[in-house]
Amino acid sequence: MTLTQYIQQLSEDKLLYFALPVFFISIWIEYRIAKEKYNSKDTRVSLLMMVFSAMVEFIPKVLAFIAFFYLYEVSPLKDIVQRQWWAWMLLFLADDFAYYWFHRANHEVRLFWAGHVPHHSSVYMNLGTALRQGVGERIHKFLFWMWIPLLGFDPLMLFTMMGISLIYQFFIHTELINKLPKPIEFIFNTPSHHRVHHASNIRYLDCNHAGILIIWDRLFGTFSKELKEIEKPIYGLTVNIETYNPLKVATHEYAAIWKDVKRADRWSDKLNYIFNAPGWSHDGEDKRAKTLRKKLKSKESKVERLKFYNKTT
């Protein structure tokens, strides 16, 4: 097919028209069941972030679709991988793998975090929060999927799979579901796993980046189990912005980066403020998630050793 034909098929895709009514009905049902988990001003910001992100994403999405098409055209596998059932299964794994690294990079590179942080700025965990999408992340998002068309997957297949993944992820933003059967919890991203991801507690920071399959976090060392009996997840940021101004929600971290860059003298420090993990500082305490978790683990180990010593003496 030509690029024009692919764009024509994309314009006829009804997935979004199906998803949005389901999203809003689900939010209404959850609200009726648990009103205390919602705040009207907070939900309004979430809806505005959804609109802002869609606006910002439009041009990158069009450019990405065109890039996907030309990368697909040069793939030596395009006549082998078409739309067979097994091709969809392989694409599911490739898409989910790409999403994991995109999401993880959004937490480990401060410039990317600035574009993703609006999604984590709510102190509520509900289906409305799922619509509070990161705005700036829409600009660099599709770069993490550029390798997939080279494997022979056409751009329409890829966009469809990305849409399916986002629909799945909507439903894991809830506190109404506790834990699912162990085999499901082991393989799939679940509400329990995603509550950990949205938590600001040190033990949970920058964990569970999965889209649909939690196995990526288990494989690459970013998995954390929800331990409600030890520490209930506290949602939001380590330092909450405490504003319902949508523009500040969307841009506050960019402003913070600029402020840090200006106060640093050396170019290496300026670059670290942009590309190192959030919490890095050239003249203060290292508050990166991995550093804080390491300190917590060391502290807990000392407490456990002390308890063991007291029992044996």
Image (cartoon, helix red, strand yellow):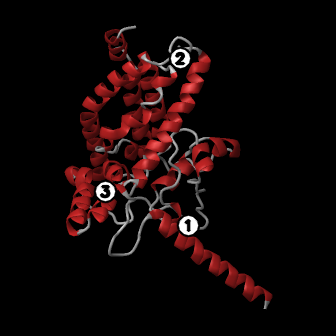
Q: Residue at x 25, y 50 (%)?
A: 250
Q: Earlier in the sequence, mark 3 or mark 2?
A: 2
Q: What amino acid type is highlighted by mark number 1?
A: Glu
In this rendered view, identify the residue nearer to me: 65 or 46.
65
| Residue at image mark 2 | 77
Q: What number of labels is visible? A: 3
Q: Residue 117: x and y, percent?
A: 34, 52
> Which one is closest to the eye, mark 3 or mark 1?
3
Quadrant of the rendering where the C terminus is positioned: bottom right
Q: Which of the pair 104/130 is nearer the observer?
A: 104
Relative height, residue 208 to residue 20 (above, below):
below
Task: Tell me: 154 left or right of 259.
Answer: right
For marks 2 and 1, give the CA distance: 49 Å
Most extreme residue toward the right, as rendered?
Answer: 312
User: Which quadrant of the structure image shows residue 72?
Assistant: top left
Q: Which residue is mark 1?
A: 231
In the rendering, at what x and y percent does residue 45 appear? 27, 48
Is 104 placed left or right of 52 in the picture?
right
Q: Is residue 273 above or below residue 246?
A: below
**Could you tell me if the residues under marks 3 and 2 are in contact, i.e. CB atoms within 8 Å?**
no
Q: Which label sits on residue 274? A: 3
